[in-house]
Image (cartoon, grey):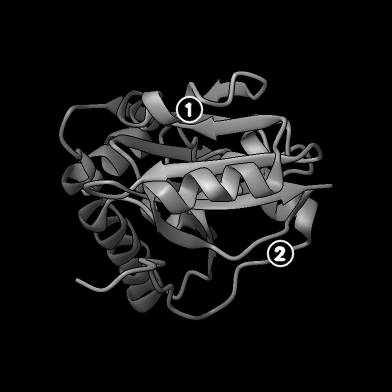
Amino acid sequence: MKLCIETSTRMLSLSLVNNSVNNREIAKVEILAQKPYSQNIALAVDFMLKSVARKIQNISEVYAGTGPGSFTGIRVGLTFANTLHQFLGIPLLGIPTLDLLAFSSGKWYNPTIVFLKSRRDEVFCSFYCNGNRKADYMVVKMDDFRTFIEKNNPEFLVSTEDGFEEFGELINQFPSCHIIRIYPHASALVLLAREKGLKPRPEFLHPMYLRGF
């Protein structure tokens, strides 16, 4: 059984996925809160396991979003995953949250920019096309983000509801872009890993912060 963890935004998303070929989701917990709920990840995982009569020892692999995003959320999520690896020897796979959002949008074969709000007037962002990332993971100021959109001329802009609320004035300057509002869902980590041929490994995960603190 696979445990999937995504804590990079204000949505705590957890999922249990079976080990069969179809990777069927058997349980999930998703909580959208004004403040990060990720500090309660251990309680949420315990509740999810009990709801399907499973134990933590039944987990064979862990998939986790590595950010960028909420500093606290990422740290808590990856610490939980790394603890499972340290004490139970469970292999881990980390996937950048921007990649997960691009994949989950269903549009990353089209020119697509994915962004998440950072702080103040900055965004985390990257550009995708043909099912692959075509630019670096970046944290940029608003003026640079505007230039980034103009340069890549995307068909789609993908972010959370928070991102579009925060930067709506800028986004409105690009009326030809289609807007997709989504939060990252943990179960999609397994699907993205399968599409890219990625496998969990016996090593610790590290966060993608993109900035100093």
Which residue is at a point 39% across and 24% down the rendered structure image? Answer: 168
x and y percent of residue 155 in the render?
72, 30
Q: Where's residue 149, x and y in %?
A: 59, 43
Q: Is residue 142 above or below residue 174?
A: below
Number of the label disc, if any, that sits on residue 198: 2
> Which residue is depicted at the point 41% across and 48% down?
143
- The correct choice, above or below, for 21 with respect to 132 in the image is above
* Helix, strand or loop under label 1: helix
The answer to whether residue 49 is above or below residue 201 is above
Residue 203, given in percent of the width and then of the height, sits at 49, 81
Position in image of residue 118 (x %, y %): 31, 49
Q: Tally the numbered discs.
A: 2
Can residue 96 be seen here? The reply is yes
Q: Amino acid at mark 2?
A: Leu
The amino acid sitting under disc 1 is Ile
Question: Left or right of 116: which side holds 148?
Answer: right
Compare residues 32 and 26 and report the one nearer the observer.
32
Tag in front: 1 or 2? 1
Tell me the quarter of the image containing the C terminus: bottom left
Question: In the image, what residue occupies the spot 35% across and 51% down?
Answer: 69
Q: Element at badge 2?
A: loop
Q: Closer to the camera, 138 or 175?
A: 175
Q: Which residue is mark 1?
A: 171
**Going from the N terminus, do you reach mark 1 or mark 2 first?**
1
**Residue 44 badge:** none
